[in-house]
Image (cartoon, rainbow, N blue to C red):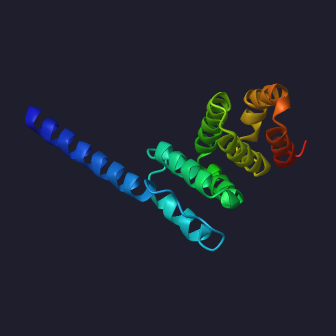
Amino acid sequence: MKNFLDDNFVAIFEIHLNSTNFISSHLHPPLQVNTDNIKDLVIELFREDLVRGKGLLIRSIMTAQAQATPFTNVYAAVIAVINTKFPDIGDLLLDRLILQFKRSYLRNQKAVCLSTVMFVGHLVNQQVGCKTFDCKNSGHLILCTEILYGQKSIVSTITKQYGY
């Protein structure tokens, strides 16, 4: 009996390891998304185990968005489509973006602050996790905008993206 359980455990562990390696190999380089390949990418992402690989997906999308800010609206659309099936992914992405904004503000990284605010604005406009974001996290950005009165470009970006 013990040998059977050990063999079964090893088989399950190998399946888990293979699927994790498969997910990380598909999501490790930043996702290259544009308006032409968005449909194919979303279909490919739904074939993956997004529940297990949501951290890798979010890291990949955040990296890709930071590298290509003109495509921020496309990345927000991808997350909006994924959010229809897996709402935890949108909430986790918003939480990580707020933490990234706080860190970049404290480190005085203006470019990272601007790209993060732009991405959060597009996500809110796409209604990704808007209920939890409005209640929990918008206070952080509003407090930061009151602190940022000397940095007018970040405040103007927040105003443009959110439509206040």
Tell me what residue is drawn at x 62 percent, y 58 percent: 68
Q: Which residue is drawn at 49% across and 50% down?
A: 50
Question: At which x and y percent is residue 160?
Answer: 86, 48
| 126 sits left or right of 42 in the view | right
Q: Residue furthest right?
A: 164
Which residue sits at x=79%, y=40%? Answer: 154
Q: Which of 25/86 is in front?
A: 25
For residue 141, say whether it is visible. yes
Answer left or right for 137 relative to 163: left
Point out residue 32 in the picture as x, y percentages from the top left corner.
54, 64
- The quarter of the picture where the N terminus appears is top left
Quadrant of image for the C terminus: top right
Task: From the viewer's side, name the closer residue of 62 and 37.
Answer: 62
Task: Locate residue 65, reporting x and y percent.
Answer: 61, 53
Viewer-closest of 22 and 119: 119
The residue under the point 56% across, 52% down is 61
Image-quadrant location for residue 3: top left
Query: Quadrant of residue 135 in the image?
Result: top right
Compared to residue 95, the image places residue 156 above or below, namely below
Residue 118 in the image: above or below residue 100: below
Is any part of residue 1 visible from this angle? Answer: no
- Location of residue 95 with respect to 12 vertically, above or below: above
